[in-house]
Amino acid sequence: MEALIVILAIGAIFFVFIYQRQAEERERLARENEIEEQKHIIMESLEIIQNSSNEKTRRSRIGVIQDAAAKIISINKSHEYAKSVLALLPQLEKQIAFDAANDRIEKLFERAKAAKTVNTVKKNISLAVGELEDIFNKGLIDEDEFNRNKKILLKFASDFEHDSYMEKGKRLEFKGQKKRALDAYQDALYTLLNDGIPDDEQTEEIAALQKKIENLAGAKTNSKKDK
């Protein structure tokens, strides 16, 4: 009888041991499956961030990645993949911010190119420069890139305004309205001298316009004397 009891006890212990091992194995597999599922969510989100052009969608995926990585770390605190993904997020956020601002700048520039009036051009270029200054202040572009792109934007606005005044001056001069033509050319010169672009980079344009103004002013004076 005692032997039977011992055998039963050993059997019970063995059954409990097997049950515990099976339970542990199920838990281990469940943890692995959860980690794999969260890794899939992370990889899917990274792909969306890479391919989407929608800022809101891309930013929302940053939160999804953070949650998924946190779940993995709650299961395995030393999980290297989850740690590396979390370390990558600040750079991804910067890239999203840069891409969004760059997209806005390009759209504003396109609007400026399509504009028909000086005021509309200047408004869109001013907004584009503001966006450019914002990403520069956030450290998303370096000073050289900032200055190079700002110069492109300002030059476009300056050229448009300058050309508008020049065209106006030519029409007035053609009509014999020399005083009004002179005013238009002076406005064109003022634009060149106050467009934010160094004068030494526009030496020829400024000199040619100054000469034009001097000649027209002289002709205007002579015409008065002739009268």
Image (spheres, grey):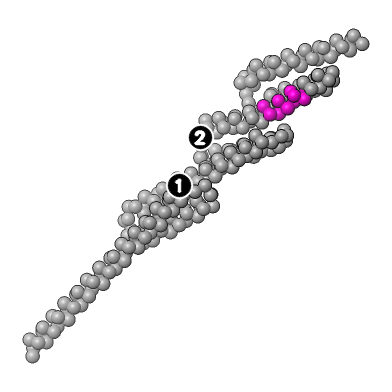
Q: Quadrant of the C terminus?
A: top right
Which amino acid type corresponds to the residue marked 2 in the rendered image? Asp
Q: Amino acid at mark 1?
A: Gln
- Asked if one can make out residue 52 in the rendered structure from this viewpoint, the answer is yes
Is residue 92 placed above or below 189 in the rendered structure? below
Residue assigned mark 1: 50
Q: Nearer the viewer, residue 91 or 180?
A: 180
Q: Check disc 2: other Cα within 10 Å, few if <14, some if 14-19, many if 20+.
A: few
Which residue is under mark 2?
A: 142
Q: Number of marks in the image? A: 2
Q: Is residue 29 above or below residue 50?
A: below
Does the segment drawn in magenta span residue 165? yes
Instruction: Give the mark, 2 or 1, whose residue is nearer the N terminus.
Output: 1
- Please report the residue visible at 84 percent of the width from the left and 14 percent of the height from the top: 220
Give whichever of 159, 189 is nearer the camera: 159
Q: In this rendering, is residue 224 above or below 167?
A: above
The magenta span reads 159-169
In three-dimensional space, the C-alpha distance between marks 2 and 1, rounded to whole angstroms, equals 23 Å
The N terminus: image quadrant: bottom left
Residue lying at 69% horizontally and 15% vertically, measured from the top left: 208
- Judged from the image, the secondary structure of the residue bearing numbered disc 2 is loop
The quadrant in which residue 31 appears is bottom left
Q: Position of residue 65 (x, y in %)?
A: 43, 55
Q: Position of residue 21 (x, y in %)?
A: 22, 71
Q: Is 225 left or right of 146, judged from the image as shown? A: right
